[in-house]
Amino acid sequence: MFYLKSLVLASLLIFMASVNAKANGPFYVEPYTGYFIGDREGDGIVDGELNSLYAGLRLGVEMKNGLILGVDYGQTLTGDFDAENNNSEGDYEQKDMGAFIGYRITPYVRIYGSYIFKYESEVDFDNSTSNPEFEGDGFNVGISLKPASNIKIGVEYQIRNIKEFSDGTDVFGDNESKTYMLTLQLPVPLPFAIR
C-alpha cells in the first residue's frame, strides 16, 4: 500500500509540473551516491554515532523557471552504528521516501530539499537479540555544484524524527538523527517531454 501511494504521488507531481515544463525533455532521472556521518539521540532510543554509504534516486520534472519537482528514494548500503553508553556496535539500515523540490540558481548551482514522509531504520546489534525497528519522517536540505560535465557534487544536512516502532507503538520522548552527507549526483536527461 505504501508503494502504491508513492507511485500515485510521483505521478501526480509529474503531471502537475509537466503543464509548465520545458519542451526539450524536462523529465530526468538523477541517481546519486554518498557517505554520511552523524548521530542519533533521544529519550526512548540508544544514543550513538551513525555512518554509512548511501544510494538513492530522484525522479522529477524541471520547469522553465528552474524549479524542479519530484520524488526521492534512498537507502544505506553499509551502515554502522556505535552506541555511546555501552560500547556496543551494529549494522545500521535506513530507508527514506520523500517529495523533492529544487531550484537551479545557475547552470552550475542548485539548492534542494526533500520532505521525507516515510523513514525506516534498524540497528542489528552484534551482541543482542533485540533489534528494534523505527519509523518516522524528516527532511533533507542541500546544495549541489556542477564543476565538470554532468557530474554534480553535493552537501546535504539530514534530520530524521523517530516517532514509532515498526509495530505502531509510539517511541517515548523526542528522538532524532542528524547527519551530514557528501554526494555525487549524475542527472540523466531523457530525450522526450511529458505530455
Image (cartoon, rainbow, N blue to C red):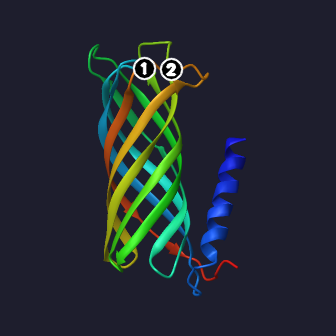
**Is 170 on the left or on the right of 113, as rendered?**
right
The amino acid at mark 1 is Phe
Residue at the location (67% across, 69% down)? 15
Residue at the location (60% across, 23% down)? 168
- Residue 101, numbered circle: none
Q: Quadrant of the N terminus?
A: top right
Q: Nearer the viewer, residue 59 or 52?
A: 59
The amino acid at mark 2 is Pro
Give how far across and how far down residue 24 sits, in percent. Answer: 57, 87
**Is 131 on the left or on the right of 43, as rendered?**
right
Q: Which residue is mark 1?
A: 125
**Is 114 on the left or on the right of 16, as rendered?**
left
Answer few, some or many: residues within 10 Å of disc 1's Cα (few below 14, many 20 plus, some between 14 and 19). Answer: some
The residues tagged by marks 2 and 1 sit, at their Cα atoms, a distance apart of 10 Å
State the count of labels: 2
- Is label 2 or label 1 in front? 2
Q: Is residue 147 above or below residue 164?
A: below
